[in-house]
Amino acid sequence: MKPILLDMNAEEISAIMKEGGQPSYRAGQIFSALHLGKEFSEISNIPKALIAALEDKYTAQPVKIEKEFPSSDGAKKYLFRLEDGVLIEGVLMRYKYGNTLCVSTQAGCRMGCAFCASGIDGLARNLTPGEILGQIIAVNRAEGGVAGDRAVTNVVLMGSGEPLDNFENTLKFLRLAGERGGICVGQRNISLSTSGIAPKMRELADAGFSVTLTVSLHAPDDTVRERLMPVNKAYPIKEVISAARYYFEKTGRRVIFEYALIGGVNDAKEQAAALAAVTSGFPTHINIIKLNYVKEKKLRGASKESVRVFFDELKRRGASVTLRRTLGGDVDGACGQLRRSYLDE
Ligand code: SF4
């Protein structure tokens, strides 16, 4: 595989230009064009010889849309193909305030959460910064063209993979996404979702990032959480909450806790009370969502009634909580499911 130019920031591209005897302003032209989704041959304001030299050495766009799956609720699921044939997926969700794209940070995942199809085959490989970014660029181009329309206004790192298990590449992606002349999605518009790798949550705060940190909790006690999320053995709830508090103290951003309600597993009223207690003491918010049915895992979402009781109990205890819609349910919206059904075909 050729090196991916989209992995590089403007300064790194500038160094390549310098080496090739090109004026430094070419770096900005190339950087902006790549972030609009252009292939080298489509960059009209650089010399043909330079286009040929770049084509020879580098890949411009490492992410291609393999297939689109529109859902009846307006969401659209994408299956992306990378240069080496690896398939990853993303979902575009349309809200009143803009369009949010959920992107993958790894092909597969090694965290092994019980409710997730992404981890079934383990980790295939980490994605490079440009491959994470390339998903947004591909959707921007597919939805808005190359005229500079940016269809994607918000990004959630919540597709397949654990972003903090691909730490350096995720950090570089965050920097690239906010760079001038690029896709211009700032940290305030990015959510990073983690299964709770506590030391990396602290490192993220120490590195000066202030993205919205979303922690998948899914249970208020270690016994149930360990069953659902093996990562809890390494980082139990107490450590995860302490790292979340640290993130808030460093960044001033309240931390979001994700909680997927699974029938008969984590949806009891007492568990709602315990959840309100463990997430209290600093600014937090809880998103509860009914689990999408995961056929490989035989896990079902909670009933409508227990979702209502759970939500009411959290409210009654003063928690800040939102009941989220399940988007993309009819196109295998839960992470990892689409890729698997496509591979099964
Ligand atoms: S839920 Fe996220 S962290 Fe857990 S296995 Fe799936 S992709 Fe990995």
Image: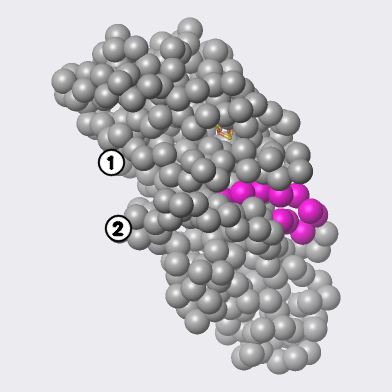
| Quarter location, residue 11 | bottom right
Marks 2,1: beta carbons within 8 A = no
Coordinates of residue 95 in the picture (x, y in percent): 34, 55
Vertical arrangement, residue 281 with respect to residue 343, above or below:
above
The residues bearing labels 2 and 1 have C-alpha atoms spaced at a distance of 26 Å
Residue under label 2: 96
The image shows residue 174 at horizontal and vertical percentages of 50, 54
Q: Residue at x 61, y 49 (%)?
A: 89
Seen from the viewer's position, the closer of residues 300 and 239 is 300
- Label 1, on which residue? 252
Asked whether residue 89 is drawn in magenta, I would say yes
Q: For the residue with label 2, is its CB less than 8 Å from the closest atom of ligand 1?
A: no
Q: Which quadrant contains ligand 1?
A: top right
> Would you place residue 238 above or below residue 158 in this image?
above
Which residues are the magenta region? 81-90
Residue 96 vs residue 234: left or right? left
